[in-house]
Image (cartoon, rainbow, N blue to C red):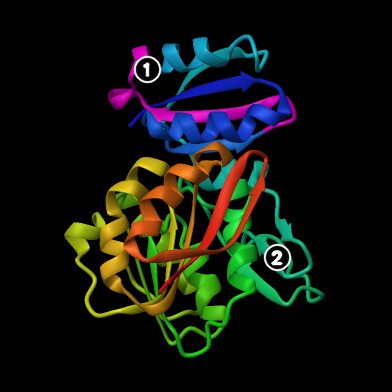
Amino acid sequence: MDYLEFKIACLEEYREILIAELAEIGFDSFLETEEGIEAYAPENDFDRSSFDELIDKYVVPAHISVQENIMSKVNWNEEWEKNYDPIAVEDLVYVRASFHPAQPEFKYDIVINPKMSFGTGHHATTYQMLLHQAELDHQGKRVLDVGSGTGILAIMAKLLGADQVEAFDIDEWCVENGNENFQLNEVEIKMDIGTIREVDPQGTFDIILANINKNVLLDEMEIYTELLAPEGLLLLSGFYTEDIEDLLERCTPLGFSLVKKQSKDNWAALVLEKK
């Protein structure tokens, strides 16, 4: 399958916003560069009108320029090795690819070969979720990772002592990649494919991790409520700081109270407790 490659030069503060919005319209692989980002989409599924509308929206404020190419039979592993840099989440977590050496000064080491999946720690939402996780007691807990992507949050839960972790994603490539990453980190997790309604997790969970997007979170909030044990914790991200109030308006009537909130690069993350 051929891929369309877009080399997008933009202001640095718009990189993560563009990645998130391009992911919403069918792009499934991204690389950050000195000039901006490189974004990839399957040629057969490319939505030209949605792409043009998105670029028009940001072309002036983000100072965007675009170069477009077709890439045949992409060696994604080679592309990632050329462009993927490790991430230090403060002094707690070192997220690296398998071709990077470990850094023993960090408390937790996570190996992620992301290929085309989303959630590497580079994005502000994943970064904040990892920080929130590191502050919570996972020992012996049952954890659900909704929209797991690369599996990075599920892996972190296991490293923090979770007894059982269930993960799933709607994207077949994410599921394949996530299960590979679980093996790399030697954690006993298996990622399933489907939405939360299709996967239909059973029982109750002590912690639910949901780093998706605002609309999905709002739609699935009642399901999270049903699956979460009393005094269980719900960690949310994937939305902008201006969306916090909308999320809280949805959560509060369902019995959630806000424990903590934070933001990075205009992306928000919340920790909520089920009363």
The C terminus - image quarter: bottom left
> Against 243, is 247 above or below?
below
Residue 232 image offset from top left, x and y in percent: 42, 76
Question: From this viewpoint, which residue is outermost toward the right?
Answer: 105
- In the rendered image, residue 179, in percent from the top left (x then y), is placed at 39, 66
Q: Is residue 17 above or below residue 216?
A: above
- Is residue 152 visible in the rendered image? The answer is yes
Q: Name the residue under label 2.
A: 94
Pick whichever, 222 or 47, lies toward us.
222
Residue at 71% across / 56% down in the picture? 87
Is 46 inside the magenta-drawn segment?
A: yes
Residue closer to the observer: 94 or 255: 255
- Label 1 and label 2: CA atoms lie apart by 36 Å
| Amino acid type at mark 1 | Ser
Element assignment for label 2: strand
Q: Which mark is residue 50?
A: 1
Closest to the observer: 231 or 109? 231
Q: In this view, does 73 lie to the left or right of 35?
A: left
Q: Position of residue 86 (x, y in %)?
A: 70, 55
Residue 165, picture quadrant = bottom left
Q: From what the image shows, is residue 63 above or below residue 33?
A: above
- Dot 2 alpha-carbon crowd within 10 angstroms: few under 14, some 14 to 19, many 20 or more: many
Secondary-structure class at tag 1: helix
Which segment did they paint magenta? 33-49
Q: Does the magenta stretch include residue 6?
A: no
Identify whether 202 is placed above or below 180: below
Q: Which of 101 and 168 is in front in this view?
A: 168
Q: Residue at 32% across / 61% down in the picture?
A: 254
